Image (cartoon, rainbow, N blue to C red):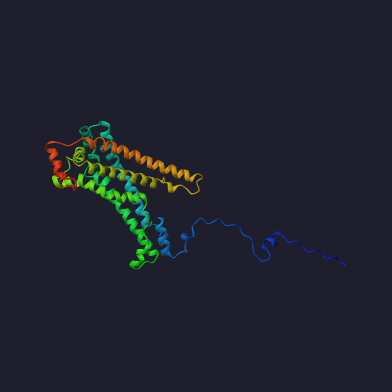
Amino acid sequence: MAQQAPPALPTLDDEEAGVMGLTEVEPSPVEETPNEFKEGYFPVDEKRERQEEFGLPRRTTTILGLGGSHGPVWWLTRIQKYSSYAFGIFATFHIANTSLIPLAVRSVPDANRQLLLTRPYYQSTLAEPLVVALPLVAHITSGIVLRLYRRRQALQRYGAETQTDKRSIPWPALSGTSLLGYALLPLASFHVWSTRILPVYMHGDNSLINLSYISHGFANHPFISFAGFSALVGMGVWHFSWGLAQWMGWKPSQVSAYSEHKDLERKRRWYVINGVAAAVAGLWLAGGLGVVGRAGKTVGWIGKEFDELYSKVPFMQTP
């Protein structure tokens, strides 16, 4: 009688199939796209709002599969960023004229002669609107609109309809840089009004406005002048320093969470940014207060013209 063959051993394919009839497949790469931005995870409108909130590009496709656009946050942020770069050109000229040159020559009359040579480059009919006025207005407006837009997005996200609901939802948090910017706005507006707008309104032009005009105000009203100028320079320099650090990715909060020495790096950045701001502010005040602020009154008919202008400035009427 023939001997029965032993049962066949299971093959590799049988083991992979398993007792449940499952088949092993190749592992797929880990998804790197967050769930909240996957197609179809949220409704279209909600997904678009989340993308715009975080400044992510919102893609729209035409029938031909072409085209693409960015959300309002993306555009407003870039308007705010690049307008600050343009205004920085003017700020560089301005600090040179009002501080560095007076500090170098140690004389307001000599610094005025240098001011007459450099001022036309940024106060001409074409340069002043493009380099000063337009970037400044764009920077301020984009910041305010961006804040209002994020507020509206928050109200829509939480479904706030009544005034009670809206009051219960907090506004977007203000950073220290933004707070400095809002505090700087009235000081900068007053400075522009008293040195650019008022002379044109009173005398038809501002050709007489120079460093001697500022010195005249310091001599007649030292407390208000020194306090206001110090606040203007301090807020402006710290706002610009921290704003530039944000655009360049240098802020302490922008240190990678995976950095091996993240705490040390954050402290180092904080000290560097504030150190640079303190150095620039100190240099500006050294020329502005130490030289221009101590030059004294202007006599003669030009001094009388200055007195007439200051008589229209609140809290700075000439005694």
Question: Where the N terminus falls, by quadrant?
Answer: bottom right
Position above or below: 18 against 181: below
Is residue 199 toward the left or the right of residue 144 in the image? left
Question: Where the C terminus falls, by quadrant?
Answer: top left
- Picture coordinates of residue 133, whole percent (x, y): 25, 48
Is residue 167 toward the left or the right of residue 254 in the image? left
Examine the image and state in which quarter residue 167 appears. Answer: bottom left
Most foreground residue, 179 or 112: 179
How many numbered marks are there? Answer: 0
Residue 139 at least partly seen:
no
Farthest-out residue, top: 105
Position above or below: 45 against 262: below
- Picture coordinates of residue 179, whole percent (x, y): 33, 51
Most foreground residue, 100 or 279: 279
Which residue is at 34% across, 51% downward?
A: 178
- Picture coordinates of residue 101, whole percent (x, y): 26, 34
Which residue is at 42% across, 43% downward?
A: 269
Residue 140 at least partly seen:
yes
Farthest-out residue, left: 301
Is residue 283 toward the left or the right of residue 307 in the image? right
- Picture coordinates of residue 237, whole percent (x, y): 32, 43
